[in-house]
Amino acid sequence: KRDNRAIVFSDKGPSVSLSYDGVPIDYFDREGRLVGMFVDDHHFRRGLDNRLLEKFRIGNGRQRIRRDVLGSRKCDLVTAVYERAQQVLDAVRDGAVSAFTPQGLGAHIDQDVARANVLERLETIERWDWDRLVIDGERFRNIYAPVSILPPDQYLALVVQMTIGCSYNKCTFCDFYRDRPFSIKSADELRIHITQLLEFFGESAWLRQSLFLLDGNALVIPQEKLLERLDVIGEFFEFTPVGITDPTARARWRREHPHGFDGMYAFLDAFSTLKKTVSDWERIRERAVRRVYLGLESGDDEVLQFIRKPGDRATMVDAARTIRAAGINVGVIAMVGVGGDRYAEQHMQNTIDTINDMELGEGDIVYLSDFVNHPGLPYERLAAEQQIA
Protein backbone atom coordinates (compact mmCIF):
# COMPACT_ATOMS: atom_id res chain seq x y z
CA LYS A 1 0.00 0.00 0.00
CA ARG A 2 1.02 3.61 -0.59
CA ASP A 3 -0.91 6.72 0.51
CA ASN A 4 -3.85 4.41 1.35
CA ARG A 5 -3.93 3.22 -2.25
CA ALA A 6 -3.89 -0.51 -2.90
CA ILE A 7 -1.36 -1.32 -5.60
CA VAL A 8 -1.83 -4.89 -6.80
CA PHE A 9 1.14 -6.57 -8.46
CA SER A 10 0.35 -9.92 -10.09
CA ASP A 11 3.02 -12.26 -11.45
CA LYS A 12 1.36 -14.83 -13.72
CA GLY A 13 4.48 -16.36 -15.23
CA PRO A 14 4.35 -15.22 -18.87
CA SER A 15 3.07 -11.79 -17.83
CA VAL A 16 2.87 -9.38 -14.92
CA SER A 17 0.27 -6.72 -14.18
CA LEU A 18 -0.12 -3.62 -12.06
CA SER A 19 -3.38 -2.07 -10.89
CA TYR A 20 -4.00 1.00 -8.77
CA ASP A 21 -7.11 0.77 -6.57
CA GLY A 22 -8.47 -1.51 -9.25
CA VAL A 23 -7.89 0.78 -12.25
CA PRO A 24 -6.13 1.27 -14.53
CA ILE A 25 -4.60 -2.15 -15.07
CA ASP A 26 -1.35 -2.42 -17.02
CA TYR A 27 0.07 -5.69 -18.39
CA PHE A 28 3.66 -6.50 -19.35
CA ASP A 29 5.44 -9.56 -20.70
CA ARG A 30 8.34 -11.19 -18.89
CA GLU A 31 10.83 -8.98 -20.69
CA GLY A 32 9.02 -5.78 -19.62
CA ARG A 33 7.29 -4.97 -22.90
CA LEU A 34 3.83 -3.48 -22.61
CA VAL A 35 1.16 -6.04 -23.58
CA GLY A 36 -2.02 -4.12 -22.81
CA MET A 37 -4.01 -1.98 -20.42
CA PHE A 38 -7.52 -1.28 -19.22
CA VAL A 39 -8.20 2.42 -18.77
CA ASP A 40 -11.56 4.23 -18.44
CA ASP A 41 -13.51 1.17 -19.63
CA HIS A 42 -11.35 0.92 -22.75
CA HIS A 43 -9.19 -2.14 -23.44
CA PHE A 44 -5.89 -1.57 -25.21
CA ARG A 45 -3.78 -4.34 -26.71
CA ARG A 46 -0.27 -3.69 -27.91
CA GLY A 47 1.14 -5.90 -30.64
CA LEU A 48 4.80 -6.81 -30.82
CA ASP A 49 4.96 -4.70 -33.99
CA ASN A 50 4.04 -1.74 -31.71
CA ARG A 51 0.49 -1.35 -33.01
CA LEU A 52 -1.99 -0.40 -30.31
CA LEU A 53 -5.56 -1.67 -30.68
CA GLU A 54 -8.37 -0.01 -28.72
CA LYS A 55 -11.64 -1.81 -27.93
CA PHE A 56 -14.70 -0.34 -26.20
CA ARG A 57 -18.49 -0.30 -26.36
CA ILE A 58 -20.97 2.48 -26.98
CA GLY A 59 -24.77 2.75 -26.99
CA ASN A 60 -25.23 1.08 -23.60
CA GLY A 61 -22.89 -1.67 -24.66
CA ARG A 62 -24.75 -2.62 -27.81
CA GLN A 63 -22.05 -1.59 -30.28
CA ARG A 64 -18.43 -2.68 -30.06
CA ILE A 65 -15.73 -0.38 -31.45
CA ARG A 66 -12.28 -1.64 -32.49
CA ARG A 67 -9.71 0.78 -33.85
CA ASP A 68 -5.99 1.42 -34.02
CA VAL A 69 -4.61 4.15 -31.79
CA LEU A 70 -2.37 6.44 -33.81
CA GLY A 71 0.05 9.33 -33.50
CA SER A 72 0.72 11.27 -30.33
CA ARG A 73 -2.20 9.67 -28.47
CA LYS A 74 -0.56 6.25 -28.74
CA CYS A 75 2.73 7.66 -27.47
CA ASP A 76 0.97 9.42 -24.57
CA LEU A 77 -0.96 6.32 -23.50
CA VAL A 78 2.12 4.09 -23.56
CA THR A 79 4.29 6.66 -21.82
CA ALA A 80 1.71 7.02 -19.03
CA VAL A 81 1.87 3.26 -18.40
CA TYR A 82 5.60 3.32 -17.87
CA GLU A 83 5.38 6.45 -15.75
CA ARG A 84 2.91 4.68 -13.45
CA ALA A 85 5.21 1.67 -13.17
CA GLN A 86 8.18 3.96 -12.46
CA GLN A 87 6.29 5.64 -9.61
CA VAL A 88 5.63 2.25 -8.05
CA LEU A 89 9.27 1.25 -8.43
CA ASP A 90 10.44 4.51 -6.84
CA ALA A 91 8.02 4.00 -3.95
CA VAL A 92 9.31 0.47 -3.35
CA ARG A 93 12.91 1.62 -3.49
CA ASP A 94 12.47 4.52 -1.07
CA GLY A 95 10.27 2.60 1.35
CA ALA A 96 7.10 4.59 0.68
CA VAL A 97 5.20 1.34 0.15
CA SER A 98 4.06 0.51 3.67
CA ALA A 99 3.34 -3.20 3.39
CA PHE A 100 3.51 -6.17 1.07
CA THR A 101 0.67 -8.67 1.43
CA PRO A 102 1.28 -11.76 -0.71
CA GLN A 103 -1.89 -13.66 -1.55
CA GLY A 104 -3.00 -16.83 -3.25
CA LEU A 105 -0.26 -19.37 -3.92
CA GLY A 106 2.34 -16.86 -2.75
CA ALA A 107 0.71 -16.19 0.63
CA HIS A 108 3.56 -17.92 2.48
CA ILE A 109 6.23 -15.56 1.11
CA ASP A 110 7.62 -13.16 3.71
CA GLN A 111 7.90 -9.39 3.30
CA ASP A 112 11.55 -9.28 2.24
CA VAL A 113 11.16 -11.95 -0.43
CA ALA A 114 7.96 -10.35 -1.72
CA ARG A 115 9.68 -6.97 -1.96
CA ALA A 116 12.66 -8.49 -3.80
CA ASN A 117 10.39 -10.25 -6.30
CA VAL A 118 8.46 -7.06 -7.03
CA LEU A 119 11.67 -5.07 -7.41
CA GLU A 120 13.10 -7.57 -9.88
CA ARG A 121 10.06 -7.41 -12.14
CA LEU A 122 9.68 -3.63 -11.89
CA GLU A 123 13.33 -3.09 -12.73
CA THR A 124 12.80 -5.21 -15.86
CA ILE A 125 9.89 -2.95 -16.82
CA GLU A 126 11.98 0.15 -16.04
CA ARG A 127 14.31 -0.64 -18.94
CA TRP A 128 11.54 0.16 -21.41
CA ASP A 129 10.01 3.38 -22.70
CA TRP A 130 8.25 4.62 -25.82
CA ASP A 131 11.42 5.05 -27.88
CA ARG A 132 12.67 1.55 -27.12
CA LEU A 133 9.26 0.04 -27.99
CA VAL A 134 9.35 1.80 -31.37
CA ILE A 135 12.77 0.31 -32.11
CA ASP A 136 11.61 -3.07 -30.82
CA GLY A 137 8.60 -2.98 -33.16
CA GLU A 138 10.90 -2.43 -36.12
CA ARG A 139 13.03 -5.34 -34.99
CA PHE A 140 9.93 -7.56 -34.83
CA ARG A 141 8.94 -6.60 -38.38
CA ASN A 142 12.40 -7.63 -39.58
CA ILE A 143 11.90 -11.10 -38.09
CA TYR A 144 8.28 -11.73 -39.12
CA ALA A 145 6.08 -10.99 -42.08
CA PRO A 146 2.75 -9.66 -40.70
CA VAL A 147 1.19 -12.27 -38.42
CA SER A 148 -2.34 -12.16 -39.81
CA ILE A 149 -4.38 -14.60 -37.73
CA LEU A 150 -4.15 -17.28 -35.04
CA PRO A 151 -6.81 -19.59 -33.61
CA PRO A 152 -8.08 -18.27 -30.25
CA ASP A 153 -6.52 -21.14 -28.28
CA GLN A 154 -3.12 -20.28 -29.79
CA TYR A 155 -3.00 -16.54 -29.08
CA LEU A 156 -0.16 -17.09 -26.60
CA ALA A 157 1.78 -19.53 -28.77
CA LEU A 158 5.31 -18.84 -29.95
CA VAL A 159 4.95 -18.28 -33.69
CA VAL A 160 7.41 -19.83 -36.14
CA GLN A 161 6.93 -18.62 -39.72
CA MET A 162 7.88 -21.74 -41.65
CA THR A 163 6.19 -20.42 -44.78
CA ILE A 164 5.20 -16.96 -46.00
CA GLY A 165 1.76 -16.31 -47.48
CA CYS A 166 -0.89 -18.80 -48.59
CA SER A 167 -0.36 -21.43 -51.28
CA TYR A 168 -3.90 -20.85 -52.64
CA ASN A 169 -4.74 -17.22 -51.76
CA LYS A 170 -7.85 -16.96 -53.98
CA CYS A 171 -10.74 -17.13 -51.50
CA THR A 172 -12.99 -14.18 -52.26
CA PHE A 173 -13.42 -13.10 -48.62
CA CYS A 174 -9.81 -13.29 -47.39
CA ASP A 175 -7.27 -10.48 -47.50
CA PHE A 176 -4.72 -11.89 -45.03
CA TYR A 177 -2.01 -12.80 -47.51
CA ARG A 178 -2.69 -10.76 -50.64
CA ASP A 179 0.34 -8.59 -49.96
CA ARG A 180 2.84 -11.45 -50.18
CA PRO A 181 3.57 -14.36 -52.53
CA PHE A 182 3.75 -17.86 -51.11
CA SER A 183 7.22 -19.13 -50.26
CA ILE A 184 8.81 -21.82 -48.14
CA LYS A 185 11.80 -21.09 -45.92
CA SER A 186 14.81 -23.24 -46.62
CA ALA A 187 16.22 -25.24 -43.72
CA ASP A 188 18.98 -22.65 -43.19
CA GLU A 189 16.54 -19.73 -43.46
CA LEU A 190 14.37 -21.42 -40.85
CA ARG A 191 17.34 -21.82 -38.50
CA ILE A 192 18.16 -18.12 -38.84
CA HIS A 193 14.51 -17.19 -38.27
CA ILE A 194 14.26 -19.26 -35.08
CA THR A 195 17.55 -17.91 -33.76
CA GLN A 196 16.34 -14.35 -34.31
CA LEU A 197 12.97 -14.88 -32.69
CA LEU A 198 14.51 -16.53 -29.62
CA GLU A 199 16.86 -13.58 -29.23
CA PHE A 200 13.88 -11.23 -29.59
CA PHE A 201 11.58 -12.92 -27.06
CA GLY A 202 14.28 -13.75 -24.54
CA GLU A 203 13.11 -15.59 -21.43
CA SER A 204 9.45 -14.99 -22.29
CA ALA A 205 9.76 -17.43 -25.22
CA TRP A 206 10.01 -20.34 -22.83
CA LEU A 207 6.91 -19.32 -20.89
CA ARG A 208 4.62 -20.01 -23.84
CA GLN A 209 2.78 -23.30 -24.10
CA SER A 210 3.07 -24.23 -27.77
CA LEU A 211 4.50 -23.41 -31.18
CA PHE A 212 2.26 -22.26 -34.01
CA LEU A 213 3.51 -22.72 -37.56
CA LEU A 214 2.54 -19.94 -39.95
CA ASP A 215 1.54 -18.72 -42.51
CA GLY A 216 -1.61 -20.08 -44.14
CA ASN A 217 -1.27 -23.69 -45.35
CA ALA A 218 2.08 -24.12 -43.59
CA LEU A 219 1.82 -27.92 -43.76
CA VAL A 220 1.28 -27.94 -47.53
CA ILE A 221 5.06 -28.34 -47.97
CA PRO A 222 5.95 -31.57 -49.84
CA GLN A 223 6.29 -34.37 -47.30
CA GLU A 224 10.06 -34.91 -47.18
CA LYS A 225 10.78 -31.18 -47.13
CA LEU A 226 8.16 -30.75 -44.40
CA LEU A 227 9.75 -33.45 -42.26
CA GLU A 228 13.13 -31.78 -42.75
CA ARG A 229 11.71 -28.42 -41.59
CA LEU A 230 10.06 -30.02 -38.57
CA ASP A 231 13.37 -31.66 -37.68
CA VAL A 232 15.05 -28.24 -37.86
CA ILE A 233 12.50 -26.94 -35.36
CA GLY A 234 13.30 -29.95 -33.19
CA GLU A 235 16.92 -28.77 -33.04
CA PHE A 236 15.77 -25.78 -30.99
CA PHE A 237 12.78 -27.01 -28.99
CA GLU A 238 11.66 -29.94 -26.83
CA PHE A 239 8.09 -31.21 -26.94
CA THR A 240 5.97 -33.25 -24.56
CA PRO A 241 6.30 -36.90 -25.68
CA VAL A 242 3.18 -38.06 -27.47
CA GLY A 243 2.78 -40.99 -25.08
CA ILE A 244 2.31 -38.74 -22.04
CA THR A 245 -1.42 -38.06 -22.01
CA ASP A 246 -2.29 -37.88 -18.31
CA PRO A 247 -2.63 -34.18 -17.32
CA THR A 248 -0.64 -34.67 -14.11
CA ALA A 249 2.17 -36.42 -15.97
CA ARG A 250 2.18 -33.72 -18.66
CA ALA A 251 2.42 -31.00 -16.00
CA ARG A 252 5.29 -32.85 -14.34
CA TRP A 253 7.10 -33.15 -17.68
CA ARG A 254 6.74 -29.40 -18.23
CA ARG A 255 8.18 -28.65 -14.79
CA GLU A 256 11.13 -30.92 -15.52
CA HIS A 257 11.63 -29.36 -18.97
CA PRO A 258 11.28 -25.58 -18.51
CA HIS A 259 12.20 -25.05 -22.15
CA GLY A 260 9.64 -27.56 -23.38
CA PHE A 261 6.40 -27.06 -25.33
CA ASP A 262 3.15 -29.01 -25.57
CA GLY A 263 3.51 -29.39 -29.32
CA MET A 264 3.18 -27.72 -32.72
CA TYR A 265 -0.03 -26.49 -34.36
CA ALA A 266 -0.78 -25.17 -37.86
CA PHE A 267 -3.39 -24.19 -40.46
CA LEU A 268 -4.07 -26.25 -43.56
CA ASP A 269 -6.76 -26.07 -46.24
CA ALA A 270 -8.62 -29.33 -46.47
CA PHE A 271 -7.88 -29.82 -50.19
CA SER A 272 -4.15 -29.88 -49.39
CA THR A 273 -4.59 -32.96 -47.22
CA LEU A 274 -5.27 -35.02 -50.35
CA LYS A 275 -1.51 -35.04 -50.92
CA LYS A 276 -0.80 -36.81 -47.60
CA THR A 277 -1.72 -40.31 -46.45
CA VAL A 278 -2.43 -41.51 -42.92
CA SER A 279 1.14 -42.81 -42.86
CA ASP A 280 2.42 -39.34 -43.83
CA TRP A 281 0.43 -37.78 -41.00
CA GLU A 282 1.77 -40.35 -38.54
CA ARG A 283 5.32 -39.26 -39.36
CA ILE A 284 4.25 -35.64 -38.85
CA ARG A 285 2.69 -36.59 -35.51
CA GLU A 286 5.99 -38.20 -34.45
CA ARG A 287 7.54 -34.76 -34.84
CA ALA A 288 5.13 -33.20 -32.31
CA VAL A 289 2.39 -31.74 -34.53
CA ARG A 290 -0.62 -32.02 -32.24
CA ARG A 291 -3.49 -30.22 -34.01
CA VAL A 292 -4.23 -29.10 -37.58
CA TYR A 293 -6.76 -26.29 -38.12
CA LEU A 294 -8.96 -26.77 -41.17
CA GLY A 295 -10.71 -23.78 -42.72
CA LEU A 296 -14.04 -25.47 -43.41
CA GLU A 297 -15.87 -22.11 -43.68
CA SER A 298 -19.03 -23.93 -44.86
CA GLY A 299 -20.25 -27.49 -45.27
CA ASP A 300 -22.39 -26.47 -48.23
CA ASP A 301 -20.88 -27.00 -51.67
CA GLU A 302 -22.73 -24.07 -53.22
CA VAL A 303 -21.36 -21.69 -50.60
CA LEU A 304 -17.86 -23.08 -51.09
CA GLN A 305 -18.13 -22.45 -54.82
CA PHE A 306 -19.46 -18.95 -54.21
CA ILE A 307 -16.50 -18.01 -52.00
CA ARG A 308 -14.09 -19.89 -54.34
CA LYS A 309 -12.91 -22.17 -51.58
CA PRO A 310 -11.19 -25.20 -53.15
CA GLY A 311 -12.52 -28.63 -52.32
CA ASP A 312 -16.00 -29.69 -51.33
CA ARG A 313 -17.91 -31.12 -48.40
CA ALA A 314 -16.65 -34.66 -49.03
CA THR A 315 -13.04 -33.42 -49.15
CA MET A 316 -13.48 -31.63 -45.83
CA VAL A 317 -14.84 -34.74 -44.15
CA ASP A 318 -12.10 -36.94 -45.59
CA ALA A 319 -9.43 -34.45 -44.46
CA ALA A 320 -10.58 -34.47 -40.86
CA ARG A 321 -10.91 -38.24 -40.74
CA THR A 322 -7.48 -38.81 -42.33
CA ILE A 323 -5.69 -36.51 -39.92
CA ARG A 324 -7.52 -37.94 -36.91
CA ALA A 325 -6.73 -41.49 -38.03
CA ALA A 326 -3.05 -40.63 -37.60
CA GLY A 327 -3.64 -39.52 -33.99
CA ILE A 328 -3.55 -35.77 -34.69
CA ASN A 329 -6.41 -33.59 -33.48
CA VAL A 330 -8.20 -31.16 -35.77
CA GLY A 331 -9.59 -27.68 -35.28
CA VAL A 332 -12.52 -27.00 -37.60
CA ILE A 333 -13.30 -23.37 -38.42
CA ALA A 334 -16.75 -22.48 -39.76
CA MET A 335 -17.97 -19.00 -40.72
CA VAL A 336 -21.20 -17.59 -39.35
CA GLY A 337 -23.03 -15.53 -41.99
CA VAL A 338 -20.92 -16.30 -45.03
CA GLY A 339 -23.09 -16.52 -48.15
CA GLY A 340 -25.63 -14.09 -46.75
CA ASP A 341 -29.37 -14.52 -46.72
CA ARG A 342 -29.57 -16.54 -49.94
CA TYR A 343 -27.56 -19.44 -48.57
CA ALA A 344 -28.29 -19.02 -44.84
CA GLU A 345 -30.45 -22.09 -44.21
CA GLN A 346 -28.49 -24.57 -46.32
CA HIS A 347 -25.18 -23.17 -45.07
CA MET A 348 -26.19 -23.73 -41.46
CA GLN A 349 -27.69 -27.19 -41.87
CA ASN A 350 -25.02 -28.59 -44.18
CA THR A 351 -22.22 -27.20 -42.02
CA ILE A 352 -23.69 -28.93 -38.97
CA ASP A 353 -24.05 -32.18 -40.93
CA THR A 354 -20.49 -31.93 -42.25
CA ILE A 355 -19.00 -31.41 -38.81
CA ASN A 356 -21.02 -34.36 -37.48
CA ASP A 357 -19.74 -36.51 -40.35
CA MET A 358 -16.15 -35.73 -39.35
CA GLU A 359 -16.65 -37.86 -36.23
CA LEU A 360 -14.71 -35.50 -33.99
CA GLY A 361 -13.68 -36.52 -30.51
CA GLU A 362 -11.63 -35.58 -27.48
CA GLY A 363 -9.04 -32.92 -28.23
CA ASP A 364 -10.77 -31.69 -31.39
CA ILE A 365 -12.13 -28.13 -31.54
CA VAL A 366 -14.85 -26.40 -33.53
CA TYR A 367 -14.64 -22.61 -33.89
CA LEU A 368 -17.44 -20.41 -35.19
CA SER A 369 -15.94 -17.31 -36.75
CA ASP A 370 -18.08 -14.28 -37.62
CA PHE A 371 -17.93 -13.50 -41.33
CA VAL A 372 -16.59 -10.00 -42.01
CA ASN A 373 -17.09 -8.41 -45.43
CA HIS A 374 -13.89 -6.51 -46.20
CA PRO A 375 -14.64 -3.71 -48.69
CA GLY A 376 -12.88 -4.05 -52.02
CA LEU A 377 -12.51 -7.82 -52.00
CA PRO A 378 -14.13 -10.02 -54.69
CA TYR A 379 -16.75 -11.27 -52.21
CA GLU A 380 -18.33 -7.80 -51.99
CA ARG A 381 -18.59 -7.51 -55.78
CA LEU A 382 -19.97 -11.02 -56.26
CA ALA A 383 -22.55 -10.56 -53.50
CA ALA A 384 -23.71 -7.29 -55.07
CA GLU A 385 -23.99 -8.89 -58.52
CA GLN A 386 -26.16 -11.69 -57.11
CA GLN A 387 -28.07 -9.36 -54.77
CA ILE A 388 -26.97 -11.24 -51.68
CA ALA A 389 -27.34 -9.38 -48.42
Image (cartoon, rainbow, N blue to C red):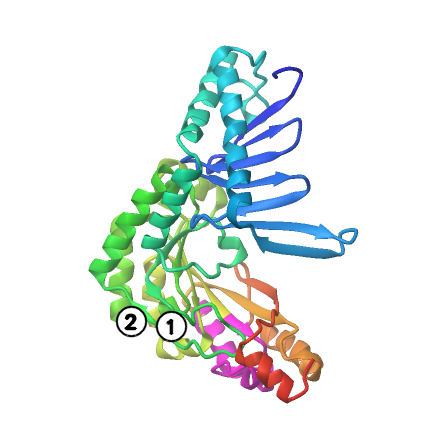
Local crowd size for mark 1, using a 10 Å CA cut-off: few (<14), some (14–19), many (≥20): some
Element at label 2 = helix
Q: Is residue 193 left or right of residue 351?
A: left
Q: Amino acid at mark 2?
A: Gln
Q: Nearer the viewer, residue 299 or 185?
A: 185
- Residue 354: give x, y in percent of width and height: 59, 77
Q: Quadrant of the N terminus?
A: top right
Q: Is residue 323 above or below residue 100?
A: below
Q: Is residue 254 visible?
A: no
Local crowd size for mark 2, using a 10 Å CA cut-off: few (<14), some (14–19), many (≥20): some
Q: Residue furthest right?
A: 60
Q: Nearer the viewer, residue 264 or 97?
A: 97
Q: Residue at x 67, y 76 (%)?
A: 348
Q: Is residue 53 above or below residue 90?
A: below
Q: Residue at x 36, y 68 (%)?
A: 219
Q: Is residue 225 visible?
A: yes
Q: Is residue 308 magenta?
A: yes
Q: Is residue 214 above or below residue 8?
A: below
Could you say which quadrant of the image residue 332 lies in? bottom right
Element at label 1 = helix
Could you say which quadrant of the image residue 325 lies in? bottom left
Q: Residue at x 41, y 59 (%)?
A: 146
Q: Is residue 116 left or right of residue 257?
A: right
C-beta proximity under 8 Å, tags 2 and 1:
no
Region in magenta? 295-324
Foreground label between 2 and 1: 2
Q: Amino acid at mark 1?
A: Val
Magenta stretch, main secondary structure, is helix
Q: Which residue is mark 2?
A: 223
Residue 278 is labelled as: 1
Q: Is residue 138 left or right of residue 28?
A: left
Q: Residue furthest front?
A: 72
